[in-house]
Amino acid sequence: MAAPRSFVWSRRIFLTVLAGFVLVPVYVMVSSSLKPLADVTGKFRWLPSGLTVRPYIDIWSTVPLARYFVNSLIVAGAATLCSVVIAVFAAYAVSRYDFRGRRVFTLTVLSTQMFPGILFLLPLFLLYVNIGNATGVALFGSRGGLILTYLTFSLPFSVWMLIGYLDSVPRDLDEAALVDGCGPLGALLRIVVPAAIPGIVAVAVYAFMTAWGEVLFASVMTNDTTRTLAVGLQGYSTLNDVYWNQIMAASLVVSVPVVAGFLLLQRYLVAGLTAGAVK
Amino acid sequence: MTTTTTARKEPVRPISPGAARVPRRTGRIRRASLPYLLLLPALVLELLVHLVPMVIGIVMSFKELTQFYIRDWGSAPWSGLGNYRLSVDFDAPVGEALLHSFLVTVGFTLLSVVLCWLIGTAAAVFMQDTFRGRGLLRALFLVPYALPVYAAVITWVFMFQHDNGLVNHVLHDQLHLTDKPSFWLIGDNSFYALLTVSVWKGWPFAFLIVTAGLQNIPGELYEAAALDGAGVWQQLRRITLPSLRPVNQVLVLVLFLWTFNDFNTPYVLFGKSAPEPADLVSVHIYQASFVTWNFGTGSAMSVLLLLFLLVVTGGYLLLTSRGRRTTDV
């Protein structure tokens, strides 16, 4: 049955307005990054008076953007990898085993989602400093400390989503593997993990985005050499002259990897959410 | 979104002679130490990064922790409930500001969650059927969610600029809606600026979750309804929305917690101290701790905030889970 005209027109109008709302900042970011400085310091112009790639060249020297970029890549990449591996193990335990404290574990992990980040910012900062003083392991100000922090941010959601996803992977599969002589870990790695790839990819995307976009902890827990993009980008706007075209160019450059990756993997994300979290 | 065990109907085959004797509780295997080993890394990390700092934070909230004691926070003098008394004394400046900030946050969060949910659900429902350009539109709609917060919010900061921003250019120069260009990042308008950015950034998450939820509704339901003569609007009211209820219950809670605790958006939008009409609690506490250097008071405020969130979440979960059996969270 074809949808009635009222529905089709409501849909057209709603989706057009929404697309406009979404697109305007994206357009501003892209067009302003190609404008000469005069265009972004004077009245706003929808169309640039002239196109220039100068901002894309200057961003690298105004602030050490390349270094921030590498820091962000290392921190977000490592946090994602660790978070996913740890979450797969934990979710496998909860999904496949009945053990004392199972419910307490899921509840505890989930409830950490509720904590305001501000509540443990300062204590964590003090804890890292104390661990550093006591053991010589530099956590505060290092990439390691930030990796450790970020991987726990995405962990609760990842564990929760993967429990749901692993529950949807038929247990006959790994039980057959166990009968065939695989150990539990063998069954996990050879059978369950490959079957759960969409869920795992979804969780990895989420973990990477969380780490790549975090501002609060990055601004307190990094120093000049370990600064990530989240903090580094603020370097353009504290100067006397605000180079808006460079800010927009830099924003675009730091966004492209995540947005491209996200859009490429979004099918997995919906598939992962469908089987995992949304049931 | 619950991981109910009722979905598993097939009997568990014994995997070894030993396992056969074990009582089959919920169809899960019982093994002594392996599950704990698998959980160990997650547990240790959650303890180290979330629970231990939280305990330290609670201890700190009973101390007079100013910048003089930050190097050796254990030696800071106890102040008992002093920090709490200061935080909830609504006649004094500190408590009054906290109360104000709390009320702003509640209002802002409710508005933002409702708008995000409405827009996200409408978009997901409208895009449930295939039409030309749907895939492209879906990718576009996910862009605000995928953009790193600071990059997206900085673009909004540029758009909200008084002299060279797009918003004033459109509202004042092109549409002549205002007498003179407005200020968006200071003064009363800052609340609406924050709300706009928050909704722009947040609704795609609702869209994503509802889209996933819609894929779980069997198509036969719609076919049967269409045969019975139900139009699209009736199908929406009778099938789609009721089927989405469990998804929505969790979605709204997650949106609420994320928006309420959001620090990144106001921090990038306004900097270290937000204008009063848009002074969200998380930034307020950050300022109380790191700008005015009173970590004890900041911690007390955080603990109060956590208590509030615990009560709200607990009440919400009790209300929404009534009448349906949940075996897990």
Image (cartoon, helix red, strand yellow):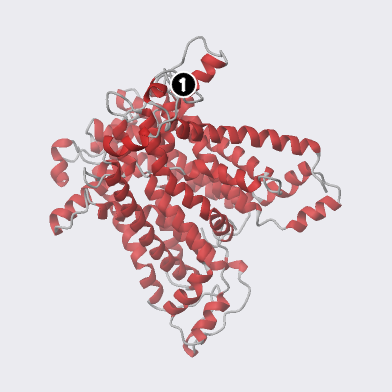
Can you give x and y, in whole percent of width and height, for residue B154 in the image? 40, 33
**Mark 1 residue element:** loop
Task: Report if residue B109 is visible in the image.
Answer: no
Disc 1 residue crowd, few under 14, some 14–19, many 20+, Cα 10 Å: many
Task: Report if residue B19 is visible in the image.
Answer: yes
Residue at image location 44% in from the left, 74% down from the top: A189
Up the image or down, B179 lies above or below A41; here it is above
The mark tally for this picture is 1
Viewer-nearest residue: A26 or B302 = A26
- Under mark 1, the amino acid is Phe
Residue at image location 24% in from the left, 38% down from the top: B296
Up the image or down, B193 lies above or below B213; here it is above
Q: Chain of mark 1?
A: A
Which residue bears the numbered disc 1? A44
Can you give x and y, in whole percent of width and height, for residue A46 in the image? 51, 24
Can you give x and y, in whole percent of width and height, for residue A61 in the image? 27, 37
